[in-house]
Amino acid sequence: QTLRARFDYRLKNAQGETVRHENSMMLVAGPDGTPLRASGISVDITDRHRIEESLRAKERELSDLSRRNAILFEGAMAAIVIIDADSGLIVDLNVAAETLFARPHEEMIGLHQSQLWPPAADVLARRIGEHRDAAEEAEIITADGHQVAVDVTSNVFETMAGQRFVQCVFRDIRQQKQ
């Protein structure tokens, strides 16, 4: 029979600083349960613990940032559509985009951008190839087939994993056009 135990604890070192140690122990017993031998090791895990705590703090910070970004994205008055730069498919949009295009979120996800903004394929392909941002006037098509004059600002961005997206911000300019 072998009994294993692992535990960590805090203690003060010779300089009076609090350090963390992890102990791993093993007790080998005979068939009758009599201990035959014991062995163990104690490892200073102070640095590992600090790094893990730092990572947890960063994760909380990123989570907070992600929540704030989601609030800004969803709360934006302008319609925002995120398009996969390689496929041209819509991967995300905010509530204002649902309203402008008169289509629910679920219906727009996976659509090719040219179904909503016909000249988009050519315009976005140029921008992606040139890796540049731009603004222009255009017309979009709503779910009921109406054309709406908009100002479109688009920019290409790349994730840390190397995936490229185009963020398009649409502003309805029908009133200014009248």
Image (cartoon, rainbow, N blue to C red):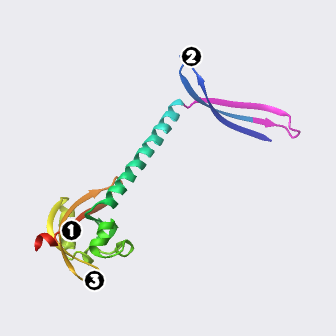
Q: Are marks 1 and 2 in contact (CB under 8 Å)?
A: no
Q: Upstream in the sequence, badge 1 or badge 3?
A: 1
Name the residue type under label 2.
Answer: Ala
Query: Where residue 84 sits in the image (x, y, percent)?
Result: 31, 66
Q: CA distance from mark 1 to mark 2?
A: 65 Å
Instruction: Establish if 57 lies above or below 97.
Output: above
Q: Secondary structure at mark 3?
A: loop
Name the residue type under label 1.
Answer: Ala
Q: CA distance from mark 2 to mark 3?
A: 77 Å
Tell me what residue is drawn at x 65 percent, y 30 percent.
41
Whether 83 is among the magenta residues is no
Instruction: Establish if 109 lies above or below 135.
Output: below
Q: Which stretch is magenta?
A: 27-45
Q: Are marks 1 and 3 in contact (CB under 8 Å)?
A: no
Q: Which residue is mark 2?
A: 14
> Is 52 displayed left or right of 156 in the figure?
right
Q: Quadrant of the C terminus?
A: bottom left
Badge 1 density bin: few <14, some 14–19, many ≥20, Cα 10 Å: some
Q: Quadrant of the N terminus?
A: top right
Q: Which residue is mark 1?
A: 125
Q: Upstream in the sequence, badge 1 or badge 2?
A: 2
Nearer to us of marks 1 and 3 is: 3
User: Which of 111/76 is in front?
Assistant: 76
Q: Secondary structure at mark 1?
A: helix
